């Protein structure tokens, strides 16, 4: 099984996750949303070799530590191009939350698309628009593990009333891409507690509705 380290970081408690091969310690890092010193300490202490930095979507609380983590690991940042405008709006996002002197985080040059492979644990990208146009999840089939970003939460789903949100699209993403995964799939959500696909099928009011 993969080594999985997940920790809430940043001003809104984004769940940063590291998925690593247990033998080689080669890993991907998902959503460095803040507290770069803590993330770097985890990488250094555990000896992880970060191959890529993967972004589920371009809201500020999922990307604020990108500069520091990219500089430390020398890994490149990847995101979905449909969130390019959202990434460019970072200064306005920070202004909305009262963050003064926001960091300048360049729009990544590296994109991924639906079903693209992830170079650790045979992972793949699932494009799941709805919370934002470029929202994605990362599925590691051999470990039955899903990093769902803000598409799916324990007992809830991501907001669709922000720029780029679309309630019909998020329901389609849930029905056609996430709820078809095995029931025992472990789900690391973008915020809050972990869950499983089976539990959400049984108890999530948005899925049941």
Image (tube, rainbow, N blue to C red):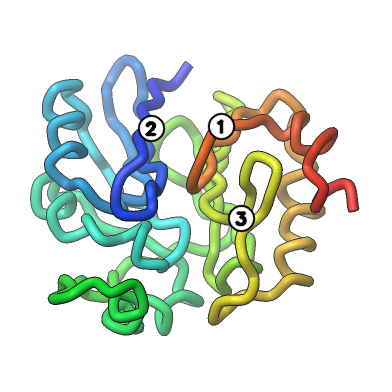
- Position of 128 with respect to 67 (left or right) is right
Give the number of the disc on residue 182.
none
Q: Quadrant of residue 22?
A: top left
Alpha carbon distance from label 3 to label 1: 13 Å
Residue 104 visible here: no
Q: Residue at x 44, y 45 (%)?
A: 118
Q: Nearer the viewer, residue 73 or 188?
A: 188
Disc nearer the start of the sequence (2/3): 2
In the rendered image, the vertical position of residue 42 relative to residue 68, given as above or below: above
Q: Residue at x 54, y 42 (%)?
A: 189
Q: Quadrant of residue 66?
A: bottom left
In the rendered image, the vertical position of residue 46 relative to residue 119, given as above or below: above
Q: Residues within 10 Å of mark 3 (few under 14, many from 20)?
A: many
Q: Residue at x 38, y 38 (%)?
A: 17
In the rendered image, the vertical position of residue 90 relative to residue 154, given as above or below: below
| Residue 159 spot, x, y in % from top left | 61, 65
Q: Nearer the viewer, residue 153 or 181?
A: 153
Residue position marked by numbered label 2 in the rendering = 6
**Tag 3 near tag 1, CB within 8 Å:** no
Q: Secondary structure at mark 3?
A: loop
Give the number of the disc on residue 194.
1
Alpha carbon distance from label 2 to label 1: 10 Å
**Tag 2 near tag 1, CB within 8 Å:** yes
Disc nearer the start of the sequence (2/1): 2
Q: Residue at x 60, y 28 (%)?
A: 186
Alpha carbon distance from label 2 to label 3: 17 Å
Residue position marked by numbered label 3 in the rendering = 151
Q: Residue furthest front?
A: 98
Q: Residues within 10 Å of mark 1 (few under 14, many from 20)?
A: some
């Amino acid at each position: 099984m993969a080594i999985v380290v997940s920790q809430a970081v940043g001003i809104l408690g984004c769940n940063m996750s590291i998925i690593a091969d247990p033998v080689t310690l080669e890993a991907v890092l998902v959503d460095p949303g803040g507290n770069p010193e803590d993330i770097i300490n985890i990488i250094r202490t555990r000896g992880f070799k970060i191959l890529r930095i993967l972004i589920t979507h371009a809201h500020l609380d999922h990307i604020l530590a990108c500069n520091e983590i990219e500089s430390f690991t020398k890994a490149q940042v990847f995101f979905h191009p449909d969130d390019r405008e959202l990434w460019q709006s970072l200064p306005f996002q920070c202004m909305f939350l009262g963050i003064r002197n926001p960091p300048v985080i360049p729009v990544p040059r590296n994109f991924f698309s639906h079903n693209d492979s992830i170079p650790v644990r045979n992972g793949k990208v699932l494009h799941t628009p709805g919370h934002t146009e470029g929202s994605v999840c990362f599925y590691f089939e051999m470990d039955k593990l899903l990093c769902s970003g803000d598409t799916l939460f324990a007992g809830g789903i991501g907001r669709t009333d922000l720029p780029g949100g679309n309630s019909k699209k998020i329901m389609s993403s849930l029905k056609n891409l996430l709820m078809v995964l095995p029931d025992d799939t472990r789900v690391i959500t973008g915020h809050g507690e972990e869950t499983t696909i089976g539990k959400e099928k049984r108890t999530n009011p948005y899925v049941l509705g």
